[in-house]
Amino acid sequence: MRSSELAELAGVTIRTLRHYLQIGILEEPERSVNGYRDYDVRHLVRLLRITRLTELGLPLASLPDVLDDPQATETLLDELDRQAAAEIERLTSRRAAIARLRRHGAMPDLPPEMAAYGPTLSAVADIAPDLARHEHEQLVLIARLVGESGTSTLAGAFAQHAIFTPATTELLRRFAELGPDTSEEAIERLADDMVTQYRPLLENWPGVEFGTELSSMLAAYGELNFNDQQHLANQLFADRLINRMTSENVPADDLAGPAEPA
């Protein structure tokens, strides 16, 4: 039989058939007088066995051992079962993450641990779309660099404290409106109000180690996303928060939160 007939009978493509010949798991047939490969029923049986084994998840590299040594079957089935169980666990976990994101209306690229923060980001987007985008992408970056455990800890802190309130809504609106025409006095007032609003959260910030790499990346990302007036507001906020804590004899190291709360 010709290649096309064999492939059709076995339910594979001509390309797959040629690949099996190339890697040696299917024996090269004799050729007819006109140069075409001439397969027989033995090739079909071999190809059907190969197809069945690959459907079970057997890698091609292991096929020769199994096809030619029945004693290897038990060990192989144990390994295939282990791989299938691991795949089921992985897919179950993925479905749970999808369900959590869907339940909270969160974007799919948001870490599942932060899914509950999705409505907050949506609300921020209604008043300050650029800030919402920055916060969203910053969470993606943080989650990657602090790991699953650190992300869960941060999510717990967000759940404990009311981060998005009418007061913070107003602060975000004022921060988003900062620009070249904003007076220095208005920026200073905003920084003072940020200290009042965010200090309780930062005082109780969980002990998640951000590290030098993450801190520098967050600073660089803020540099790319904020204008000069917004940078000034954040700098004044940080300076005044530290000065106030120092004057009250509270170690500045107790403020382990993000560098730029906005």
Image: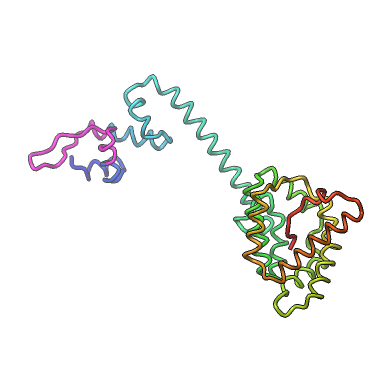
Extreme bottom residue here? 181
Residue 253: image location, x then y, percent: 81, 48
**Residue located at (85% from left, 49% from top):** 251
For the N terminus, which image quadrant? Answer: top left
Q: Quadrant of residue 2?
A: top left
Q: Closer to the camera, 144 or 84?
A: 144
Residue 164 higher or lower than 214, as above or below: below
Q: Quadrant of residue 135?
A: bottom right
Residue 57 shown in magenta: no
Residue 209 higher or lower than 23, as above or below: below
Magenta residues (range): 19-44
Q: Closer to the camera, 58 or 241?
A: 241
Q: Quadrant of residue 4?
A: top left
Residue 80: image location, x then y, percent: 47, 31
In this image, 136 relative to 241: left or right?
Answer: left
Residue 75: image location, x then y, percent: 45, 23
| Tally of marks | 0
**Residue located at (64% from left, 66% from top):** 225
Residue 28: image location, x then y, percent: 20, 34
Residue 136 higher or lower than 28, as above or below: below
Residue 145 higher or lower than 236, as above or below: above
